[in-house]
Amino acid sequence: MNYSQQYTNEVIFKAAKTNFGGNFLIVLGIWLITPKNPDFQNILILFSVVFSSLSLTVIALGIKYNSELTATVQKKYLNSYLILIAISSLCLGSILVLEGVFQGFLSVGHLGTWVFVVASTEALASFLYHRPKMFFLNFVLINGPSVVWLFSLNTTTSNVLALILLGYGPMIGMRVMELKKLKETMVTLYEKTKSREGHLQTFLDLIPAKITWLNSDLKYIGTNKLFKKTKVGIEKEGLLGVKFGAKHPEAPITKEIQRFLQSPSRSHSCELQVEVLGEPRWHLCEFSKQKFESGDEIFIISIDIDNNRKLQNELETQRGINEQASKFASLGEMAAGIAHEINNPLTIIQGNSQLIKCLHEKDKLTDVLLTKNLNKIIDTSKRIVNIIKGMKDFSRNNSEVEFVTESLQSIIDETLLFCTEKFKVNNILLKLQPIDENILCLCKPQQLNQVLLNLLNNSFDAIVEDPGVKIISIYLEFDKGMQVLCVADTGKTEVDFEKAFTPYYTTKAPGDGTGIGLSISQKISHAHGGFIKAAKEDGKTVFKLHLPLVEDHIMKKAGA
């Protein structure tokens, strides 16, 4: 059954419970205005019983009817209803004629009953306009007997009244047709609205997010399919009218919605843990308030980001592991140089120890010689201690280290402990521009050691196999209020500077590099308020570490 038919039936049967209750007033009114006439008394009693019984039956049908009945049962109800109305109309039309016959034409009883007939006709027009043919049938049944009787009287007055009744028919008929057109327009608009609502609901159901909207009392007005799925055992219709969070008033999302409703803000976004099928999961929630005549309505869109957050946490953990791995990879690449750095001092210590022993055995060890050689051993031991301390500091977890003000020269010196000897062994000339000890940087020293060591490692790999003179230079520049530590090499390797800082990009042979050193170094430089740039200058590959001047950086940190 289509909506138009269903709407028509519902209107007709609703009228049965209201309009036909008025039929008892018609019966009572006819009894009150009709003078006592023994000949007419039995007719009036019969009319009252039949008319009242028909009205009661129609009202009972209206009470029992509902749209959930099968189409067959609804059709039976409707046919019975229309037949009962037709009989009621005929009874009313007949009693009007009988009033005129027994009580007299235009008598009090006749005129009073006529008023009730007109009122009943108007009442029929108010709900039978859905079925114009049925209305015209009832109009004829009510007024037809009077028209025939009036013409049979053949008086001027009766003929005029009969003609008025005949003219009244088309007039009320036109009104019924206008009402029918209005109804059809309303039904069409309703069906279009329902169709558009259906399209909108389909669209909302396709969105991979949970969507619902609430009234100002936080009661559900609607939801989409994905939201409904999170409510196990509850159909969408079962949620309508239910208060949001009624079972869990202390839930974070319930409190957040209540705060949003009371706030002047019209939109709000946040991340919340929402319980889904008994499991708390992180959601990105978007709230929006829209004003309607009934008050504010709240629209809620929530996207499950729990897996994304877990993945993000895993990526952060993996990033930390990669940074630590890159750090140790840098140390590994310099392992040979570190071995030399430690081995040479040990050789000095061993030589001086043997010299002291030899002089002592020959009884030639004077206090001056002893002090001189012991001082050499102590100084050399300090160098070994510094190398080991540097390795230990370098391998520390950077998250445990605070920003400190440090001399840029000391950072360079600490880094060179790991690689100076390796450069010498491979005939690489290291040119180091002296840097004023007063030039400072606000930093985590171990992180800058890692950046500088990465840059030196890359320069070493770029030139170690080159013939001829191999040079790595370290020098300082100043540019736009920043101090720029430069590492340049004479290598011939071609570098794609646009991709140089992309993770896993490397110019080295497979297995010889991780490809994450420069990307991690760039991230460290950003954390220090700077950045790294690479370029070709005068035939050299130059990596430039830009760092804020210490005064500017401290002011920026304070302002943040």
Image (cartoon, grey):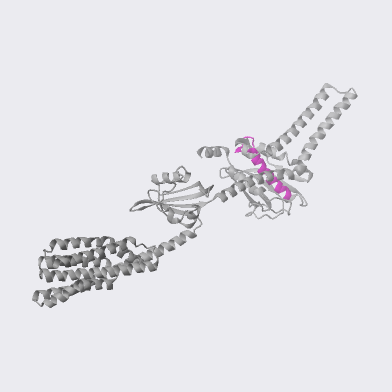
Q: Quadrant of residue 221?
A: bottom left
Asked if residue 146 lies in the magenta stretch, the reply is no
Residue 173 in percent (x, y) is at 23, 72
Residue 278 in percent (x, y) is at 53, 47
Q: Residue at x 20, y 73 (%)?
A: 169
Q: Nearer the viewer, residue 80 or 127?
A: 80
* Side of 223 relative to 134 (left or right): right
- Vertical order, 156 against 337 (above or below): below
- Vertical order, 123 against 418 (above or below): below
Q: Nearer the viewer, residue 28 or 252?
A: 28
Residue reaching furthest to the left: 156
Number of numbered tags placed on the structure image = 0
Q: Which residues are magenta?
A: 436-461
Q: Is residue 118 visible?
A: no
- Vertical order, 483 against 537 (above or below): above
Asked if residue 444 lies in the magenta stretch, the reply is yes
Q: Residue at x 13, y 77 (%)?
A: 151
Chief secondary structure of the magenta portion = helix
Residue reaching furthest to the right: 362
Q: Residue at x 17, y 69 (%)?
A: 95
Residue 56 in percent (x, y) is at 27, 62
Residue 491 in percent (x, y) is at 72, 51
Q: Quadrant of residue 425?
A: top right
Q: Quadrant of the N terminus?
A: bottom left
Q: Is residue 447 visible?
A: yes
